[in-house]
Image: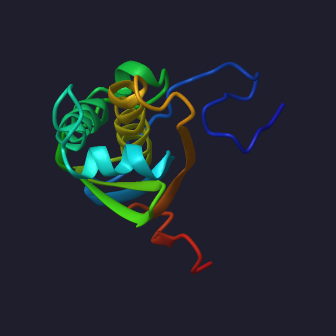
Amino acid sequence: MTTPLSHFDDLGAARMVDVSHKSESHRLARASAVVRMQPETLALIRDKQLAKGDVLEVARLAGILAAKKTADLIPLCHPLPLTAVKLDFAYPAPDQLHITAMVTVFARTGVEMEALTAVSVAALTVYDMCKAVDRAMTIETIRLDEKDGGTSGHFVRGST
């Protein structure tokens, strides 16, 4: 049984991909997520008025920690020596918080999963800190927006 999925061998057994033959190179990944909520909830976040504290700074720290722990959460991910993790927040609409993570590494494999994990956990942290005032929040559109490095080259969402 031959499969194009690299995390399975010819017999269909799960495996960690052998990257020992790959060259180390600079790699980056950018991912994003949207948290949709009541405009009043977003105003509380923006104005730092929630009783639990500064939601975005806690979410930023949670996202950074999550990126560093990705190999502990996703079974076939390689542990990587990340060189940087950066999370940013924006308010594209009165009911939306946009979260972006940029992760870089000098390694034999990419950091897409680390960037996706960072935005996911940051979004979950926002939900956790705000659920007392808005249980109807939704986490949407978790996606890879860009990756660069390695043999597969540069990917930017919407440019291909």
Q: Is residue 91 above or below residue 137?
A: below
Quarter the C terminus occupies: bottom right
Q: Position of residue 12 (x, y in %)?
A: 75, 23
Give the residue at the far front of this rendering.
Answer: 40
What is the quadrant of the N terminus in the image?
top right
* Side of 156 where 123 appears, left or right: left
State the colouring used for the structure image. rainbow
**Residue 53 left/right relative to 77:** left
Residue 92 occupies quadrant: bottom left
Tally of numbered tags = 0
Q: Which residue is pictured at 62% across the width and 39% down the height?
A: 6
At horizontal 59% and vertical 76% (from top left) the residue drawn is 158
Q: Measured along the vertical axis of the image, is residue 146 above or below residue 158?
A: above
Q: Nearer the viewer, residue 76 or 139?
A: 139
User: Taking 5 as reference, is 102 above or below it?
Assistant: below
Query: For the point 48% across and 63% down, which residue is it?
Result: 145
- State the image coordinates of residue 42 (x, y, percent, origin top left): 37, 49
Coordinates of residue 89 in the picture (x, y in percent): 30, 56
